Image: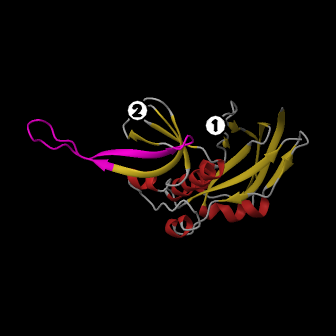
Amino acid sequence: MRRLFSAVFLFVLTLPLFAQAPGALPVANAAASVRDLPVRKVVLYKNGVGYFEHSGAVHGNQKVSIDFTSSQLNDVLQSLTVIDEGGGKVSAVNYNSTTPIEQQLKSLSIGLGDFPATLAIYQSLRGQRVEVTGAGAALSGRLVNIDSRKETDKNGNTSEDHYFLVVATDAGALRTAEITDAVSVRMADPSLQKQFTSYLEIVASAQNQQGRHLRNPCAGA
């Protein structure tokens, strides 16, 4: 169900801010067709304050994400007004932290640091339920370990390491699948998927320490 959603805020105008403020507010929902909330009204006051009103349609429990710099966020938090005109509910806003990324990642149970090696990512999934496809018959079960092997040809030449996923299937058998570009590994546990998504969000946020992302979750009526 489409609902009209509005966001209003006041800024003390500076040149960099004036260039950014009339921009669109991106809607954070990959499945949505509507990607922004365009500017509907701008009022500039003589005292250097600007009034900006954005509005557009949201669907279901869609999230609206507004990007600012750290220096702008204080003004936004003091003046932001959000209205869901279709009867939905807007919960408390939240924004990304400026805490060092190492400290933020320690709060996650997935145990990954910044810039992890590919094998480290797979190792973090040990003991978890996974679904492996692209290496013959699909495998479903718990990831036991990551095994490495070398191969020697008839001329005595030794290959680089080949890595294999060792999976304890639901039928109780141990199966292996070589890690190649064709192999896909899906986390079967929704809570683990959520942890990994949180990890990626922290990493993405840390790429731009000046960027602050204010999010407004919207619940449908």
Residue 220 is inside the magenta segment: no
Q: Which mark is residue 173?
A: none
Relative vertical location of residue 136 with respect to residue 167 in this rendering, above or below: above
Residue 185 at x, y percent in the picture? 49, 41
Relative vertical location of residue 86 with respect to residue 114 in this rendering, above or below: above
Residue stretch rendered in magenta on the structure = 148-172
Residue 114 at x, y percent in the picture? 45, 60
Which residue was labeled with disc 1?
30
Sequence-first tag of 1 and 2: 1
What amino acid does circle 1 point to? Ala
Residue 149 is inside the magenta segment: yes
> Could you say whether the residue bearing mark 1 is in a helix, strand or loop?
loop
Q: Is residue 22 visible?
A: yes
Q: Quadrant of residue 153?
A: top left
- Quadrant holding the C terminus: top right
Query: Looking at the image, how many numbered discs can be counted on the residues?
Result: 2
Viewer-proximal residue, 189 or 45? Answer: 189
Which residue was labeled with disc 2?
182
Residue sitting at x 65%, y 47%: 190
